[in-house]
Amino acid sequence: MSSATTETVRKMLESLPEDLQERTVEHLREYVEELREEIRWDRSFSATQDHLAAAALRARREIAEGKAVPVDLDAQ
């Protein structure tokens, strides 16, 4: 983060009463953690995308060849 951006955030926080500063910081922590989790998910998905595409092609081929069997979700 650039120093100008950091300074803007600092000034915004300082303009609030202290109790609101603490609440805002907590919200920021939660938001940043959500963003980090989203980044992890995106990286994980990107790393497996080729495998998922290959599995989908294989499934389509097996369906076309009559090798696929529908799953009976009601069967126990």
Image: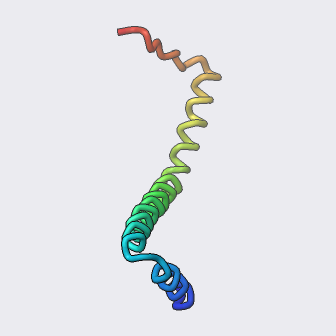
- In the picture provided, is 76 more to the left or to the right than 54? left
Residue 57 image-quadrant placement: top right
> Against 13, is 74 above or below?
above
Q: Residue furthest bottom?
A: 3
Residue occupying image coordinates x 60% and y 22%: 63
Q: Camera-side residue: 10 or 37?
A: 10
> Residue 56 location in percent, x, y?
58, 36
**Camera-nearest residue between 11 and 74:** 11
Residue 55 horizontal/vertical position (percent): 53, 38
* Quadrant of the drawing holding the C terminus: top left
Which corner quadrant of the image does residue 20 belong to? bottom left
The single residue placed furthest to the right in the displayed view is: 64
Q: Residue at 54% across / 19% down in the picture? A: 67
Q: Provide residue 60's location: percent of width, then percent of height.
A: 62, 29
Closer to us: 36 or 30: 30
Residue shown at 38% from the left, 76% from the top? 18
Q: Is residue 25 left or right of residue 48?
A: left
Q: What sort of colour scheme is used for the picture?
A: rainbow
